[in-house]
Amino acid sequence: MPGRNWGIIVAVGALFLAGCGMVSPPQQQLKNTSRSFTTIVVDAGHGGRDSGAYRRYGPPEKTVTLDVATRLSRKLRESQFNVVMTRTNDVFISLDTRVDIENSTPNSVFVSIHFNDSRRRGVKGFETYYRSPYAAELAQNIQNRLCSIKGAVNRGVHTADYRVVRKAIYPAVLVECGYLSNRSEGHEARNGDYRELLADRIAQAIVEQRHGPGVYHAPAPAVVSQEPPPPPAQQQKRKPVLAPPGEGPGLAPPTLTGH
């Protein structure tokens, strides 16, 4: 009987390991294009019936992620990169479809744009997430550039199990561009000039990741969204501080997902 039980344990263990292999690509399948990429897959988080975070201080997450992603894509094209966008309008794209797009785009890196959410309204700041070790440097560069914005709060770079980074073959990062649940950052997200600044700092980090520091030249701003900006939010004058990671990409309450 002990021998039979041991055989069952080994069989169960084998099934478990096989399941783990399906969850994320094995290490040997990961590709390091962090210094050779010619294409960026730009992913605007949420969309369609999935509004993402939705708080009274800021617009729906799906709206501002698409706006920042569109601005970012324009800047990258003007910097002579190929760009693939996972969505270009307000449609729902499943996470698995986003993964299929990123993994089928050769010699690329993947950048997913999100805004954050928290039950604690005082929480604010930028966060960047990755999973593959080949994406760590890109994640840090993006975080550094975002935190060079005046008044930025640095909530750090962290590894995460979000599907779009966990299942990626090429280097993939997920960027949290501030908290819509925070009064000041929610108001800033409504401002087109601020969204342009976010896109510019992310573009700078990507270009410098590929070609080195000092080569990025910001293109002239363009109006992407016709949304009228509200009165400018008061900026808090404070140095960047390192805070714990936040709660990740927020989901809108069910009653708001159709907005």
Image: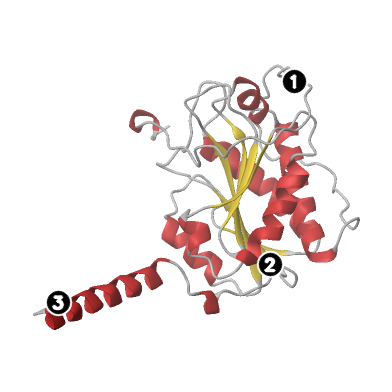
Query: Which residue type does callout 3 highlight?
Result: Asn
Q: Looking at the image, is mark 2 or mark 1 earlier in the sequence?
A: 2
Q: Secondary structure at mark 2?
A: strand
Q: Residue furthest right?
A: 214
Residue density around tag 3, few if under 14, some if 14–19, many if 20 or more, within 10 Å: few
Q: Looking at the image, is mark 2 or mark 3 earlier in the sequence?
A: 3
Q: Quadrant of the N terminus?
A: bottom left
Q: CA distance from mark 2 to mark 1?
A: 36 Å
> Foreground mark, 2 or 1?
1
Residue with the mark numbered 1 = 236
Q: 8 left or right of 132?
A: left
x, y percentage for residue 106? 62, 75
Residue density around tag 2, few if under 14, some if 14–19, many if 20 or more, within 10 Å: many
Query: Which residue type does callout 2 highlight?
Result: Thr
Residue 201's quadrant in the figure?
top right
Q: How is the image coloured?
A: secondary structure
Which disc number belongs to residue 5?
Answer: 3
> Foreground mark, 2 or 3?
3
Do residues under tags 2 and 3 come within 8 Å of each other at their CB atoms? no
Residue with the mark numbered 2 = 39
Residue 63's quadrant in the figure?
top right
Depth order, front residue of 88/120: 120
Q: Residue furthest front?
A: 2
Q: Looking at the image, is mark 3 or mark 1 earlier in the sequence?
A: 3
